[in-house]
Image (spheres, rainbow, N blue to C red):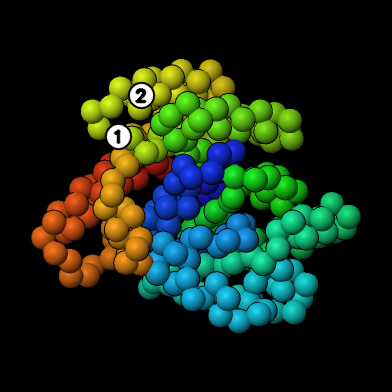
């Protein structure tokens, strides 16, 4: 099954939020889903209200599996039914090992091949910074989704991302989807940004699909503060329930435009 990466050379555009929501949605449909965090902050845990598990033990990180000190199941952390996370401890040190010890690339490939056989979907959540581990995992990915904030800085991040792929000889054809994020209704700038992004994605990633936008809603932050996603079935007050349904409907529209198996 596919390895899906969410990436952008710009922070704060919602990569982790989208990965968490998409992974949870697929898990609610009975799929076994894994999300691997290549971000030392491991922010994906906060999406599910599991911050305490980031530092729960000292050895259940990806690096310990690569060093042969843990088994494949030891570093899996279940956060929802059918949904597991893996955290990293020091990606800078991991990247240095990948540069100095080329055999480590085979180790990490074997790890992802093993998880790929065990799970229906494997997601990789990256930080905006880049390193050798970023290059290796993007190269291993089957589908890459670029998340772009709808403002001038976000559009600049998209161009920087394209340049990063070119500079590191990464395959632009693997960028199959571009997601406009942080849309604000009734504001001119995001609407203009969508038009610009459409032209840029057509020029630089002609094989990609420009997805429907995802809105900026205060309810997203409210849900995350409660450790919930739009696909958690929990009691909420009438207003939050109504807003949660709006987010869910918007996400489902985006998901319906994505084919992870093509």
45 or 145, nearer to the observer: 45
Number of residue marks = 2
Q: What label sits on residue 189 in the rendered view? A: 2
Decide: is 1 above or below 50: above
Labelled pair 1, 2 in contact (Cβ < 8 Å): yes
Q: Which residue reaches farthest left?
A: 238
Residue sitting at x 25%, y 32%: 185
Is 81 situated above or below 94?
Answer: below
* Residue 142: x %, y % from top left: 58, 45
Label 1's element?
loop
Q: Residue 68 carries which label?
A: none
Location of residue 249 with respect to 159 vertically, above or below: below
Query: Residue 258 occupies which quadrant of the picture?
Result: top left
130 relative to 159 in the view: left or right: right
Q: Disc 1 versus disc 2: distance between alpha carbons? A: 9 Å
First of labels 1, 2 by sequence position: 1
Badge 2 marks a residue whose secondary structure is helix
| Image location (x, y in percent) of residue 95 | 77, 55
Q: Which residue is most to the right?
A: 100
> Hey, which quadrant is residue 254 in on the image?
top left
Q: Is residue 49 visible?
A: yes
Q: Where does residue 9 sit, x and y in percent of width and height?
A: 59, 38
Q: Which residue is drawn at 48% across and 66% down?
A: 45
Q: In this view, does 184 lie to the left or right of 94?
A: left
Above or below, 98 against 217 in this view is below
Q: Mark 1 points at which residue?
A: 184
Indicate left or right for 123 with 235 as reference.
right
């Amino acid at each position: 099954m596919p390895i899906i990466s969410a990436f952008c050379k710009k922070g704060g555009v919602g990569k982790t939020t989208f990965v968490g929501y998409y992974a949870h949605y697929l898990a609610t449909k009975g799929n076994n889903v894994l999300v691997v965090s290549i971000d030392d902050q491991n922010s994906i845990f906060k999406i599910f209200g599991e911050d305490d598990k980031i530092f729960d033990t000292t050895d259940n990180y990806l690096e310990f599996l690569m060093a042969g000190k843990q088994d494949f199941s030891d570093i899996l952390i279940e956060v929802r039914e059918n949904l597991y996370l893996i955290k990293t401890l020091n990606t800078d040190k991991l990247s240095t090992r990948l540069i100095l010890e080329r055999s480590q690339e085979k180790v990490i490939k074997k790890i992802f091949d093993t998880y790929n056989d065990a799970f229906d979907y494997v997601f990789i959540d990256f930080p905006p910074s880049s390193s050798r581990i970023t290059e290796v995992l993007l190269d291993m990915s089957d589908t890459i989704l670029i998340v772009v904030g709808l403002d001038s800085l976000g559009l600049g991040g998209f161009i920087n991302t394209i340049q990063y792929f070119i500079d590191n000889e990464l395959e632009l054809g693997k960028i199959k989807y571009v997601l406009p994020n942080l849309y604000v209704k009734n504001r001119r700038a995001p609407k203009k940004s969508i038009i610009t992004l459409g032209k840029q994605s057509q020029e630089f990633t002609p094989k990609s699909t420009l997805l429907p936008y995802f809105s900026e809603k205060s309810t997203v932050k409210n849900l995350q503060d409660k450790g919930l996603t739009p696909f958690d079935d929990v009691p909420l007050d009438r207003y939050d329930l109504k807003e949660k349904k709006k987010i869910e409907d918007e996400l489902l529209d985006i998901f319906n435009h994505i084919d992870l198996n093509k």
